Amino acid sequence: MLIDTVIFLPFVTALAVLCVPRRFSTAHKAIAFAGSAVTLLLSLTFLWLGRRTAADQTVPWITSGWVAAYHVRVDDLRLFFVLLTTLVSAACVWAAFSYAHAERLRGYLALILSFETTLLGLFTAADLLLFYIYWDLMLIPVFLLLTGFSGTQAARRAAWSYLIYNGAGGLVLLLGIIALVARTHSFEPAAGTALPATLEWWVFAAFAIAFLIKTPAFPFHSWMPPTYTHAPPPVVALVSGVQSKAGLFAMLAFGLPLFGRAAHAWAPVLLVLAVASVLYGALTAMGEQDMKTLVAFSSLSHLGLVWLALFAFDITSVSAGILMLISHGLIAAVLFLLLGFIEERVGTRDLAQFGGLCGVAPRLNVLMLIAIMAALGLPGLSGFAGEFLILIGTWQTQPVYTSIALVSVVLASVYMLKLFQGSMHGPLRIPAGRQAGELRIREGWLVAPLLAAIVFLGVWPGWLNDRTPNVAGATHNVAGANSFAPTTHNVARANSFAPTTHNVARANSFARTVAGANSFAPDLLNLAKASPRVGQP
Amino acid sequence: MTSIAGVSISWAVLAPIVALTAGGLLIMIVDLVSRQASKAVLYGIGIVSCIASFVALLPLYGHATTTLAGAFASDRFSWLFDAVLLLTLAITLLLSSLRNAEDGTSPGSYAALLVFCTIGGMVMAGADNLIIIFLGIEQLSLALYVLAGTGFPREASQEAALKYVLLGSLASGFLIFGSALLYGSAGSVQLTALASAAASGGALFFAGFALFLVGIAFKLALAPFHTWVPDVYEGSPLAVTGYMAVAVKAAALAIVARIVYTVFGHDSAALVPLWILAILSMLVGNLGAIRQRNLKRLLGYSSIAQAGYMVVAFAGVGAAGLSALLFYLVAYALTSLGAFGVMALLGNGTDAYAELDAYRGLSWRRPWPAAAMSLFFFSLAGIPATAGFYGKVLLLEQGLSAGPWGVALAATLVAGTIVSFYVYGKVVWDIYSHVEDERKLPTGNALAPWLAVAAGAAGTIVFGLAPQIFHFLTG
């Protein structure tokens, strides 16, 4: 019941906003803000509830021909994605106040809130049909926000690449799901169902293509730069902060547990694509003058690292991947919101046409600095924790790819500092007729919680890493499950810079055995049984 | 139960058709006797006879039987097609109520023709032998040729009628020639007898089936026998186009389905030509729709593609395949009629809102019709939480659980759907575009089309979210 409330409250709020006549824009703002804030507060209760009683609910839905259920769940994997969604959405709804044309504000807020519902539905769905419904339904609010509420011709064109590319990915996923269901006659994923190897190979390929497009990863990223560049800031903060996690989340929740063998068979291809994304994203970002496109390509690079983490099949790296996903979600959301505030003031995104804002806007400068430092991986902020643990993990099984990917860490400093210096430092330059001003109080407050979360996860990454292991108890998620259990405790410590690295190393020697083995899931089960010692310092 | 020349006739089974015939005749008599009879009375009689026919259908539910010595069947299959046809007729009559005198035809003959057309469709839905099939097709087609021309002050309407007659007659020729060869090979016009002829094969049988398939593919508008569709759809009066898109398709599909399930097994090699036609239709329909700026033409191309989708259901086995077909047909009928309803609503029964340009920025002027139109186009594209989506899931499952041809059909369905995202997205894009329309076309707000739109929208959402209801209703 609580889960349903959290999922559908934003949508109900959207309907409520639509019911208020157009001229009462203050009422629209109040309702929308209250709705998203209450959703955030309710979702926080999962932190306590989810640990004791697995929040899990099933209602029969379709029983003729095949079985599908309205099955939602908040387990330790899903919990953090739900929290990320509610936190970023609340900030985005608040940020939306300053962007929309007053008379269109109603539809704008309603669509953002509907988008939040589809995202929450996606992250809680435990049934493949339900999951797919939200997966595709997400396209509509973003498509409409781009066509109707962005106001620029470029954004309306970007709507097409977004819709067609993601729609095509969705249909490939649907083909994969149905090929699976035509055999199992159930949309309830059951790990360990013996599928013929060829079918499993094809179905996993379909899943992987859809997830690669959604994330996106090289070479499926061509929809991303126009969408990220031209979408209104609150929309792009949601798309890049939250929606881009859908593919990797689904890989963790469905792809890896269901198709362990096929995942191994496909890993060489996916690793190459991951490293290609990491490098291509970083190199392109370095050459970009448009600040939103620059951050868009940095996203490609950072999420490529998570693909690398998942398909290195190392226990440390997989669990660090989750940390990285959440961390990137927060950082990307903050960056895009701040860039939106800057664009609103200086009227351009071109780094050559403005700069030196730190003098006139010190508050903006501080917030930008924290976000940029987090993005380039400064220790003590969440970006570092994720990157560092991923690279430690992947080094154990994929040293070659890891060394190539390491280059991107250096490149990240280059393009992120270029963005910061270009926009903030130097003499004040702004296009004629523009008034560069300080952040409004509201704008400062709305990014503050996101920045606080970034600092919190940077200082105490174990808070998140300690919780993810319990994925094991709550789900049949084999890959997510037993893999994390014995070691994350150590990882968390390693993370907080205590000298316990030899624990990590020991954990990783087990990881090597896993990675060497042919079949992913069963070996992880053995591992879980064999390695309780490792947990003890 | 009466008996003529040794053939027993079960009037209960024929009651739905009889009720509708009586309604059609009554319309003609009223129109004849009272020249002043208003549209409301005439169309009202039509709608009442629809309801009467539906009520007569209810007692048949659950008792499959045949009459006229096995020539006419009443089963799960015909009930559902009949229900779709009656719904289409009722909605078409509602939409037609906005027609004005300057459209040409008198409302009496127009309404009567629609009713007789539907009778032809119902005969097709129950037809279990080649003669009855031809009878139904001709009854439907002849009435429809006239209806296509009922907008005759407009030249496009005359052109549509002429094209439809010429090409339609040619197709009928193929159909009757094919039937003759089939009769020659089987020695009987009964479909059950054809099954044994199909099993033993023979050149005569396959030649006959090939010609028959050409004729029926024309009626169903499968590529490459679809060339009449865009012009006829564009030229015909709005309500008639909506009727064509749904009723004709449903009736022709009923015949294909009965032949596939009675005469062939689902994996018969003889059906390969049908699969190829379906693949071509999905591609031609969706690719052809890309450049259309006229919604009637666009929906015409769309109906070609949708017919191709529905054929995918035949790749599957028996009852599950039939369920998938029926679900998709109902979903298609609801969305298609709903879309024509919105056009009629906004244009007040005229073609003013058939051009896509008229929809620019509609959402700012008329948010509710705009939302309804978007819903229908989302459903046609198969976006989740609409009936069209679940229909596609069922069709894909049929394709993927069959052999290599089934997989090819499913893959083409997906490819076609990706293209259709652009086609249908284009309409939504215009509706929600951030563009103020300079011309500010006036929009209508009449009650009758609103009923059609509401029915379509409600059905699309309910069957999309709770498809179980459909399975419950159809058993």
Image (spheres, coloured by chain):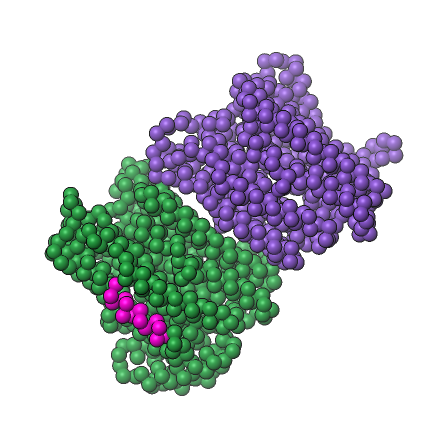
Instruction: Specify the quadrant that holds the C terminus of chain A.
Output: bottom left
Left or right, B201 with reference to B55: right
Q: Position of residue A118 (x, y in %)?
A: 41, 53
Instruction: Specify the quadrant that holds the N terminus of chain A.
Output: bottom left
Visible residue check, residue B143:
yes
In front here: A406 or A336?
Answer: A406
Q: Quadrant of residue A485?
A: bottom left
Marker count (numbered): 0
Q: Is residue B173 magenta?
A: no
In front here: A73 or A108?
Answer: A108
Left or right, A515 with reference to A60: left
- Up the image or down, A275 lies above or below B369; here it is below
Left or right, A447 with reference to B326: left
- Up the image or down, A476 lies above or below B46; here it is below
Visible residue check, residue B330:
no
Report the residue at 38% width, 69% height from top.
A275
Q: Position of residue B221 (x, y in %)?
A: 63, 39
Q: Quadrant of residue B204?
A: top right
In the rendered image of this protein, which colour is used for chain A? Answer: green
Q: Name the residue at the right extreme.
A: B6
Report the residue at 51% width, 64% height from top.
A205
For the record, the magenta segment spans A402-415
Report the residue at 52% width, 76% height from top.
A519
- Chain that is purple in the image: B
Magenta-colored segment: predominant secondary structure: helix
